[in-house]
Amino acid sequence: MRRIVLVVGLAVTMCAPCATVSADWHSMKTKWDCFWDRVHLDWHRNNAWPEPFVQVDRQATRTPISIMVDKGWELQNTIPHELFDAETQELTRAGELKVQWILTQMPLRRRMVFVLRGRTPEITETRLKSVEKAATQVVGEVAPNMISVVDTVPREGSGAYYERVNSGYEATTPPPRLPEMSDSGDSN
């Protein structure tokens, strides 16, 4: 009922000035049509809510997480300074094994090798050639985007440090306990 009163009131308000001037009839009809188009649009939006906005919200939530996941894979697949010979900048045996592991054991979409940038462009170029040579031995032809240069240094630590961290974690884990049984046989 309120809508009818509103529409009739709007129609009277819009048409009253038009009665005197016939030239304004076209502009009033355009405004009237625009009003109903807007009512129609708003009705559909109100009845569809929140669906049109859910995908945008999901994407806004997932984008930072996917960026973090990609950076984690990048750090995991980075060949650090220690896996290159200090004098020749060729891959060491451990470096060759890491390249082999990346190109054979990683999920297919994550099989990219990242080479840590050297102090000079010449060192970086030598490292890239060395990694490309090792990759060619593993997979044959190397795709152009399979090997990239990065500046982010992976987190480092000695094996002894990580062993102490793991041992400390295991030492503080409480032993598993089952709840005591009551006399009535209830587990509560």
Image (tube, rainbow, N blue to C red):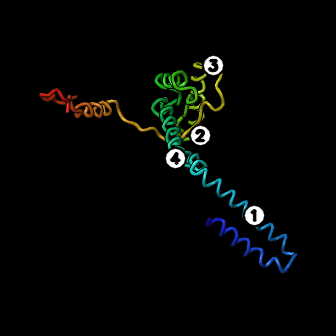
Q: CA gap, disc 1 to disc 3?
A: 65 Å
How far apart are labels 4 and 2 at the CA level? 38 Å
Q: Residue at x 31, y 34 (%)?
A: 161
Q: Which residue is mark 3?
A: 140
Figure quadrant of the C terminus = top left
According to the picture, the residue beneath numbered tag 2 turns out to be 121
Amino acid type, residue under disc 2 in the picture:
Pro
Residues packed near mark 2 inside 10 Å, few (<14), some (14 to 19) or many (20 plus): few
Q: Quadrant of the N terminus?
A: bottom right
Badges 2 and 3: C-beta atoms under 8 Å apart?
Answer: no
Residue 182 point in image, percent of width and height: 14, 29
Real-space Cα separation, disc 3 to disc 4, in angstroms? 39 Å
Q: Residue at x 63, y 32 (%)?
A: 145
Identify which residue, 165 or 129, lies in the foreground: 165
- Residue 149 position, x and y percent, is 57, 37
Residue identified by numbered label 1: 34
- Neighbourhood count class around disc 1 (C-alpha, 10 Å): few under 14, some 14–19, many 20 upward: few
